[in-house]
Image: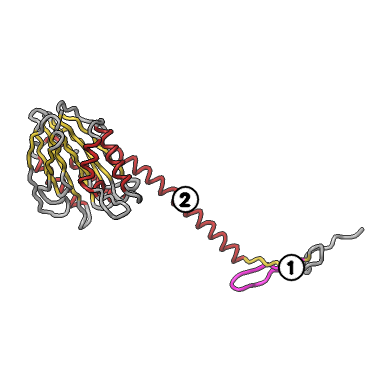
Amino acid sequence: MVEARSPFSPPPMEASWGSGQARYAVFEDLEGNRFSLIEFDEAARTLEAERRAQAGKLEAERQAAHDLAIAKQVQTRLFPQRQPLIRTLLYAGICHPARTVGGDYYDFLDLGSRRLGLVVADIVGKGIGAALLMANPQAALRSPCATAGEQPERFLRSVNQLLYENTAEGDYATLFFAEYDDDTRKLRYSNCGHPPALLLHGHDGLERLGATCTVVGLFEKWECTMEERELAPGDAVLLYTDGVTEALNGEGEEFGEESLLAAARQHRELSLPGLLAAVANQARRFSPYEQADNITLLVAKCT
C-alpha cells in the first residue's frame, strides 16, 4: 500500500512576522509546481475590523432613516388635522419639505366667536433643526391663552418671547398671522418679516399685504401692529413661503411672485386643494435641481 504524499513540504509552520503572527507553507501541486502560501493574523484582523465598521455604518444609516421616518410622522401631526367650520370662507394649505422634515409651518386656528386664525411661518434653516424650532411657535399659537384672547398683538408677543428664549442666538422665523371674522368678513393681519401675502380681488385686482413688523424670535423687545382688510365675495388671499418664489431654474432665474400669481390665476377654477397642488407642482417643475427649500402655500377664498 502506497501512502498519499502531503502537498506541503515542509508542513505549515507559524512564525513572527512584523507586528503579528503569520502561518506559511510551501505547496506543491500535482504537476510539481511549487507555491508559497502565507496567512497573516494582522490582515485577518484588519478585514474583520473593516467588516464590523461597515456593519456599524449600515446599522447607523438604518437607524437614522428610522428616526427620520418617525420625525416625519410627528411633524405631520403638527400640521392642522381638522378645519374649523367657517360659513363665509373656504381655505386649504399644503407643505412640501425640501428634506424629510423642515421648518415651514401653516395652521388653521379656532379663535372662538366665529373667528379663524390663518398662519404661515418659515423657520430659518432646514432639516431636523428647523423642524424642532418650528414646534415652538406652533405650541404658542395653539395654546389656550392664544385661542381665547381678543388681542392678537398680545399673543404674537408671546410667540416672539417663546422663540427668543428657547432658541440659539440668530435663530428666528418669519410669520404671517391673520384673523378672519366670519360675521364681518374682516381680515386683521400682522406680517412679521414674511413675504407679502397676495390679496386677489375678483379676477384682476391685486394687493400685496407686506410686512407690518420685523421677524419673530430675533429680538427680546418686540412689538407688532395689525392691519385690516374687508373681503368681498370672490376675494382670495394667497400665503406662501420663499421656497416657492425663490426656486431656481437652470439659468439661475427665480420662479418669482409673478409666476406664482400667474399659476394661481391659471388654476383658479380648481378646488382649493387642487389649486395649491397645481401651483406647488409648477414651482417644483420650474427647477431642474433637487428641491432646495421648503414649499408651503395657503389659500383662503371668501364665498
Front residue of 282/148: it is 282
Residue at 45%, 48% in the rendered image: 62
Q: Which quadrant would residue 204 be assigned to in this image?
A: top left
Residue 57 drawn above or below residue 111: below
Mark 1 or 2, nearer chain start: 1
Q: Amino acid at mark 1?
A: Phe
The residue most toward the top is 87
| Mark drawn on residue 165 | none
Q: Which residue is mark 1?
A: 35
Quadrant in the rendering for residue 189: top left
**Residue 132 magenta-highlighted:** no
Spatial CA span between label 1 and label 2: 41 Å
User: In which image quadrant can residue 139 be found?
Assistant: top left
10 Å neighbourhood of mark 2: few (<14), some, or many (≥20)? few
Q: How many marks?
A: 2
Which residue carries the number 2 mark? 59
The stretch of residues the image draws in magenta is 11-27
Q: Residues within 10 Å of mark 1 (few under 14, many from 20)?
A: few
Q: Is residue 131 visible?
A: no
Colour scheme shown: secondary structure
In the image, 102: left or right of 48? left
